[in-house]
Image (tube, rainbow, N blue to C red):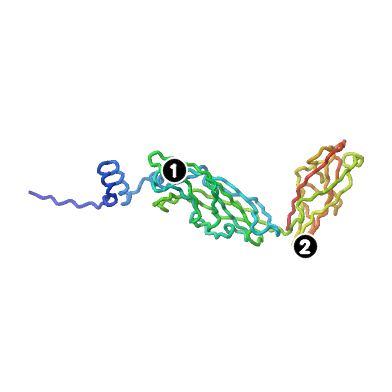
């Protein structure tokens, strides 16, 4: 009998050793299961899964809508000398919604959400992350879907140690998608001496993974936050009294003889304590501005008619413009008083008596 040479053995990966005994028995009884087992073994030997299959394996939670949210604090934030350490200077709260589906992770009961280890390294202070402005920290708290709060600003920006979890039930046949809303509160906090500057902060990325023995193999970017810049101003002055009452008193109608005539001036001051050499400017808000008469606002709480309130610069003895920034002086010895006056002025042909109150907001700028 003529013997044919034995064909060379093809190099192959054994899948028997990868199957547990029970799985091997099931594989013999169920060809479909055996085929699936072979597919995974081939993948382990270097045959790649199709792209869509690999993507499905790594999908834990995904954002609803845009994955990136911009955080905008006020464009200008003033810090006075009286602002206590630990004070919250500005707050922004946003919500993000995520959907989580667990089809592939039988040992995972929770999806874990954490800070990406690839975030820029930023140390954390006792009240949040260091920022570009000395004495200003950024704190970050997340309120989970169930109301529980997590201090994400309590560890470095690139540390995954601070995390939260959302339920992640395994449903391989008919997957269930669970939707969760997270509330993020970002705060700018004074932590020390503030000299001022431009607030900037790097992008923050959050990741998710299944809480299973697969572990970090399936970390995936989930959400990110970017931050608009803001100007932090170290105020050189403090207003001694922020709310100032000016009593205009009872005025007889006979004091008015036609539009433009006015009652007696009631003087008052805005008092400041400042760093010597500080230039101060004052702006009177124009919400109630009466354009027909200089320096005049309309009444805001009144039963009287035909009159407004005129603001005066008592130093210059003329109406103080409404809605315009005006320089009012430079401090020399650490204190300053801005002299102003107020009076009723007739603004219509006829005046009727009654309550005649007004309100005016002022803004001070320091240089």
Q: Nearer the viewer, residue 42 or 6?
A: 42
Other-residue count near label 1 (Cα within 10 Å), few / some / many at <14 / 14–19 / ≥20: many
Tag 2 secondary structure: loop
Identify the residue under disc 1. Answer: 101
Q: Is residue 250 left or right of residue 23?
A: right
Residue 169 position (above or below residue 242): above
Mark 1 and mark 2 residues within 8 Å of each other at the beta carbon: no
Residue 4: give x, y in percent of width and height: 13, 50
- Report the quarter where the C terminus lies: bottom right
Q: Nearer the viewer, residue 329 or 167?
A: 167
Query: Residue 315: which quarter of the image?
Result: bottom right
Q: Residue furthest left?
A: 1
**Mark 1 or mark 2: which comes first in sequence?**
1
Residue 146: give x, y in percent of width and height: 53, 45
Residue 239 position (above or below residue 346): below
Identify the residue under disc 2. Answer: 334
Q: Nearer the viewer, residue 303 or 11?
A: 303
Instruction: Identify the residue at horizontal 75%, vertical 43% (top origin).
Output: 287
Tag 1 secondary structure: strand
Q: Is residue 9 left or right of residue 133?
A: left
Residue 127: give x, y in percent of width and height: 59, 57
Q: Nearer the viewer, residue 130 or 229?
A: 130
Instruction: Identify the residue at horizontal 31%, vertical 44% (top origin).
Output: 36
Q: Which mark is residue 74?
A: none
Residue 274: give x, y in percent of width and height: 75, 60
Residue 239 position (above or below residue 62): below
Question: Marks 1/2: CA distance?
Answer: 64 Å
Other-residue count near label 2 (Cα within 10 Å), few / some / many at <14 / 14–19 / ≥20: some
Number of numbered discs on residues = 2
Front of the two marks 1 and 2: 1
């Amino acid at each position: 009998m003529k013997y044919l040479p034995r064909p060379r053995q093809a190099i192959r990966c054994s899948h028997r050793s990868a199957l547990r005994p029970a799985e091997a028995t099931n594989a013999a009884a169920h060809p479909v299961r055996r085929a699936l087992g072979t597919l995974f073994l081939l993948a382990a030997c270097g045959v790649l899964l199709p792209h869509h299959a690999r993507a499905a394996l790594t999908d834990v939670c995904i954002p609803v809508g845009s994955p990136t949210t911009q955080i905008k604090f006020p464009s200008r934030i003033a810090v006075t000398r009286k602002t206590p350490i630990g004070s919250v200077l500005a707050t922004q709260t946003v919500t993000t919604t995520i959907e989580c589906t667990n089809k592939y992770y039988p040992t995972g009961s929770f999806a874990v959400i954490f800070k990406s280890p690839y975030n820029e390294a930023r140390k954390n202070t006792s009240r949040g992350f260091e920022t570009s402005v000395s004495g200003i920290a950024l704190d970050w708290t997340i309120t989970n879907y169930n109301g529980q709060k997590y201090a994400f600003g309590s560890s470095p920006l690139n540390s995954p140690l601070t995390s939260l979890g959302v339920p992640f039930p395994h449903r391989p046949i008919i997957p269930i998608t669970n939707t969760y809303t997270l509330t993020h509160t970002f705060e700018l906090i004074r932590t020390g001496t503030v000299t001022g500057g431009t607030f900037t902060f790097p992008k923050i990325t959050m990741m998710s993974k299944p809480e299973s023995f697969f572990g970090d193999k399936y970390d995936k970017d989930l959400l990110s936050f970017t931050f608009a810049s803001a100007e932090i101003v170290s105020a050189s002055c403090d207003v001694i009294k922020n709310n100032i009452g000016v009593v205009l008193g009872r005025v007889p109608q006979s004091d008015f003889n036609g539009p433009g005539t006015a009652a007696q001036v009631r003087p008052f001051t805005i008092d400041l304590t400042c760093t010597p050499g500080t230039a101060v400017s004052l702006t009177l808000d124009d919400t109630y501005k009466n354009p027909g008469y200089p320096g005049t606002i309309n009444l805001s709480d009144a039963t009287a008619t035909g009159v407004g309130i005129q603001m005066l610069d008592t130093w210059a003895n003329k109406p103080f413009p409404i809605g315009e920034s005006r320089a009012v002086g430079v401090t020399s010895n650490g204190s300053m008083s801005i002299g102003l006056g107020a009076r009723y002025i007739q603004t219509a042909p006829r005046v009727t008596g009654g309550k005649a109150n007004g309100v005016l907001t002022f803004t001070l700028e320091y240089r």
